[in-house]
Image: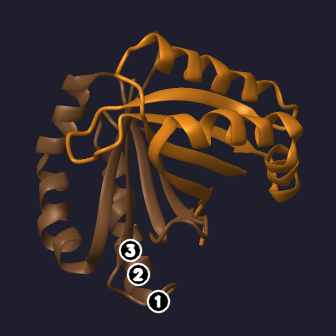
Chain colours: A brown, B orange
Amino acid sequence: MIRHTVMFTPKHQPGSAEEKALLTAARELAKISTVRRFEVLRQVSPKCNHRLGLSMEFDDEQSYDFYNEHADHVAFVNDRWKREVESWQEIDYVVYDD
Amino acid sequence: MIRHTVMFTPKHQPGSAEEKALLTAARELAKISTVRRFEVLRQVSPKCNHRLGLSMEFDDEQSYDFYNEHADHVAFVNDRWKREVESWQEIDYVVYDD
């Protein structure tokens, strides 16, 4: 299992219609067939500057690659993410089982 | 539900006995009664500088506070974390359900 997460801050005002539209578009990514446990999240720690997060899981590297290269994901990144997101940090996890 | 996560990099060499001992000590935190879904994680994105992560969930703010103030957590932070961890970033999530 690979958990792909990104914390981010849109250029939009918090709670604005533009922000909600961006999150609605993001939720469409959950329809890509290899995506598991898709979540839209609100970042609530005062020790962190980002306001929002996305989290999803993939069974393996191949499933992650399928998502990354999927036309719907590529279009979302180019048409929405790069234009509407001010800053972000990707964090990917696997279970540490040593 | 509140998901409390921290990504971090210990001062220890990756995979060293010292690092494993730190992670073993961290796993003891899962025994605090309000902790749910405790995970020790390896950060694998090349776009992120941290090497490791912890994730756990709490039912609500009160359960999170109970953990934060618990003597075992306070001792872990003072005796292990502050001495053995080079850098870290806390990220806390709740589900965005607007």
- CB atoms of marks 1 and 2 within 8 Å: yes
Task: Report if residue A37 is visible in the image.
Answer: no
Give the left or right position of residue A89, taking residue A74 as reference: right
Distance between the alpha carbons at the discs numbered 1 and 2: 5 Å
Q: Residue B52: image x %, image y %?
A: 43, 33
- Image position of A98 with respect to A64: above or below: above
Res A19 label = 2
Q: Which residue is mark 3?
A: A9
**Residue at the (48%, 72%) spot, across then down:** A51
Q: Residue B69: image x %, image y %?
A: 86, 49
Quadrant for the N terminus of chain A, please: top left
Task: Report if residue B72 is visible in the image.
Answer: yes
- Image position of A11 with respect to B24: above or below: below
The three-letter code of the residue at mark 3 reads Thr
The three-letter code of the residue at mark 2 reads Glu
Q: Which residue is mark 1?
A: A16
